[in-house]
Image (spheres, rainbow, N blue to C red):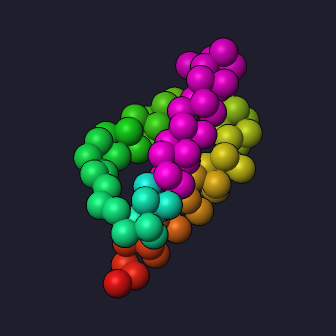
């Protein structure tokens, strides 16, 4: 992978974060959500980041932390009765 891949990976991270935020909003409003495919998307992102040189991968850390926060938020929403 090269620097040219980093913007595409960042876009994928942001897209997944948006999906998680939307899912949380739906759950909080009482709607059911289908999380099918989330595992595969997460695995693909992890593989892509893992193939980057360390410096490039580090540059994605803020976006990955945002993704983790969105996932944690969804988890809390799903656990709330």
Q: Was residue 76 drawn as part of the magenta stretch in this picture?
A: no
x, y percentage for residue 34? 28, 51
- The residue lying toward the viewer, choosing from 58 and 13, is 13
Image-based side of 29 in relation to 31, left or right: right
Residue located 47% across and 37% down the image:
45
Can you say which quadrant of the picture contains the C terminus? bottom left
- The residue lying toward the viewer, choosing from 74 and 6, is 74
x, y percentage for residue 22? 49, 52
Identity of the residue furthest to the bottom in this view: 81
x, y percentage for residue 54? 66, 37
x, y percentage for residue 57? 65, 38
Q: Was residue 21 drawn as part of the magenta stretch in this picture?
A: yes
- The residue lying toward the viewer, choosing from 69 and 3, is 69
Can you say which quadrant of the picture contains the N terminus? top right
Q: Is residue 76 above or below residue 60?
A: below
Provide the major secondary structure of the magenta segment: helix
Q: Is residue 15 above or below residue 79?
A: above
Q: Is residue 1 visible?
A: yes
Q: Which residues are magenta?
A: 1-22
């Amino acid at each position: 992978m090269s620097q040219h891949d980093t913007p595409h990976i960042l876009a994928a991270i942001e897209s997944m974060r948006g999906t998680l935020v939307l899912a949380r909003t739906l759950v909080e409003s009482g709607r059911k959500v289908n999380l099918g495919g989330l595992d595969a998307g997460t695995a693909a992102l992890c593989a892509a980041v893992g193939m980057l040189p360390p410096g490039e991968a580090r540059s994605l850390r803020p976006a990955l932390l945002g993704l983790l926060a969105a996932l944690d938020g969804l988890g809390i929403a799903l656990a709330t009765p």
